Amino acid sequence: MPRATSQLVLHFTIIICCVMVGVIQVSITTSLRDKFRAELAVRRLSNLQSSVLTNQASRSTLTISISVEPGRAAGAGTLASPQRYPLAGE
């Protein structure tokens, strides 16, 4: 086997190894990113549930104040006397 051929084989082998390392690195990065996103979603959900349970005892009603004057468009409302609506779970 001539010298150039053996060097070409060596170079191609090194290139193939580098490509395989790159593929493995991308796979690991994607896996870790997905795991991080899942953990973040679980943390947000647990924080949201705990804040809802904490706020449920302190707030019992929701106040909404919307009225529309005659002759005005439905989207151009003004504030009026508040109406009370019970929150879910009451």
Image (cartoon, helix red, strand yellow):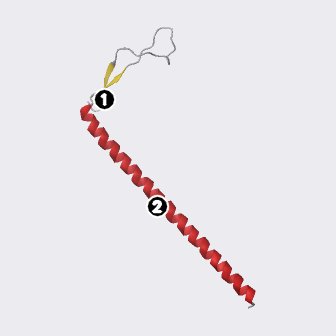
Which element is circle 1 on?
Answer: loop
Q: Residue at x 74, y 86 (%)?
A: 4
Callout 2 crowding tier (Cα within 10 Å): few <14, some 14–19, many ≥20: few
Q: Is residue 33 above or below residue 2?
A: above
Q: Which mark is residue 87?
A: 1
- In the picture, measured across the screen, residue 76 lies left or right of residue 52, that is right
Q: Nearer the viewer, residue 90 or 53?
A: 53
- In the picture, measured across the screen, residue 87 lies left or right of residue 23, that is left
Task: Name the residue type under label 2.
Answer: Leu
> Marks 2/1: CA distance?
40 Å
Where is residue 5? Give x, y as percent.
73, 85
Q: Nearer the viewer, residue 1 or 4?
A: 4
Where is residue 25? Give x, y as percent.
53, 67
Q: Residue at x 67, y 80 (%)?
A: 11
- Tell which circle, 2 or 1, labels the residue nearer the N-terminal end: 2
Q: Quadrant of the C terminus?
A: top left
Please give the residue where the numbered disc 2 appears in the rendered image.
32
Q: Is residue 39 above or below residue 72?
A: below
Q: Residue at x 64, y 75 (%)?
A: 15
Where is residue 78? Give x, y as percent.
44, 15
- In the picture, measured across the screen, residue 10 lies left or right of residue 88, that is right
Q: Nearer the viewer, mark 2 or mark 1?
A: 2
Q: Quadrant of residue 60?
A: top left
Q: Is residue 61 above or below residue 3?
A: above
Q: Residue at x 60, y 73 (%)?
A: 18
Which element is circle 2 on?
Answer: helix
Q: Which mark is residue 17?
A: none
Q: Quadrant of the N terminus?
A: bottom right
